[in-house]
Image: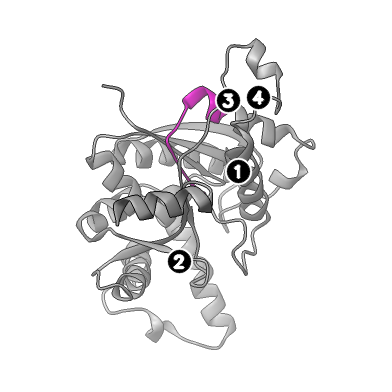
Amino acid sequence: MKKKRVLVIIPHPDDAEYHAGGLIAKFISEGMEVLFLVATDGRCGSYSQAPFKLTKIRRQEGIEGANYLGAQVEYLNYMDYELDQAPVGELREKLVRKIREYQPEIVIAEDPFQKDQVHPDHRYLAYMVSDAINFSQLPNVFPKHLDEGLQPHYVIEKYLFTEDPLRVNKIVDVTEFVEKKLQAMKKHQSQVEFLVEDVLRQAKSAGLNEDIIPLGAQNDPFQLLAYAILTQMSEVGKTVGYQYGEGYRFSRFHPAIETILQNNHS
């Protein structure tokens, strides 16, 4: 029996684990096949590492994080922070192509319609993924794919991660997979250090001191990041009675079809 396939499309090597690590671990535990498609090389995420060196580090960390969860990973190798400078239509075609090649039943990506996303890679990729998801089933979209033996494909389930509570319509109970998510995130050591340093630099600019750091985390950036991740997941989960949750903008079919399905199950 063919395994259900999940395609996770993300801008940077750590985004899958950070935003959707619990859901991904849950799907893998259910026997699904998961592929991470990473758009950029992550070369900008450091205050100290040179871009070329950081690119190699983050690529290896991405492989280790994905493999720890039980997923595979592929890279599109665009430059970090310059994704929106790709030739017009090129990224959209690559994403449609990958959906048709991989034939996933589920796609996990970022919600393009959330508010307050400041990173251009996240904004641009989210819109391109939305285009690819919604039009990869049309044979007249990139018809050259048909000549290559690639068939149109409809993605049934779309899980779009978002930190905008007004956009969340599905909260997944990931309590059982919290440790798996955290340990996968820990594989991205360079990014763990960068994210924590970024917050501490902002704290210093605000005139705050190290008292903001939870006891025991002063010498371990991962402890501080784990604390932040767990706090956020707890806030999301408690809205529906879960210890830890991840929030998504979820969709499947046209609303008319969803209504029929709901009526048939009621």
Give the Cα separation between the discs numbered 4 and 3. Answer: 6 Å
Image coordinates of residue 18 in percent, x first then y, are: 41, 55
Image quarter where the N terminus lies is: top left
Image coordinates of residue 120 in percent, x first then y, are: 68, 55
Query: Is 265 colored magenta in this rendering?
Result: no
Image coordinates of residue 116 in percent, x first then y, are: 62, 69
Residue labelled with disc 4: 139
- Circle nearer the N terminus (3, 2): 3
Residue 217 relative to residue 208: left or right: left
Query: 10 Å neighbourhood of mark 2: few (<14), some, or many (≥20)?
Result: some
| Amino acid type for the residue under numbered disc 1 | Val
- Rendered view: 99 above or below 146: below
Pick the front one: 260 or 147: 260
Residue labelled with disc 3: 152
- Circle nearer the N terminus (1, 3): 1
Residue labelled with disc 2: 196
- Rendered view: 99 above or below 249: above
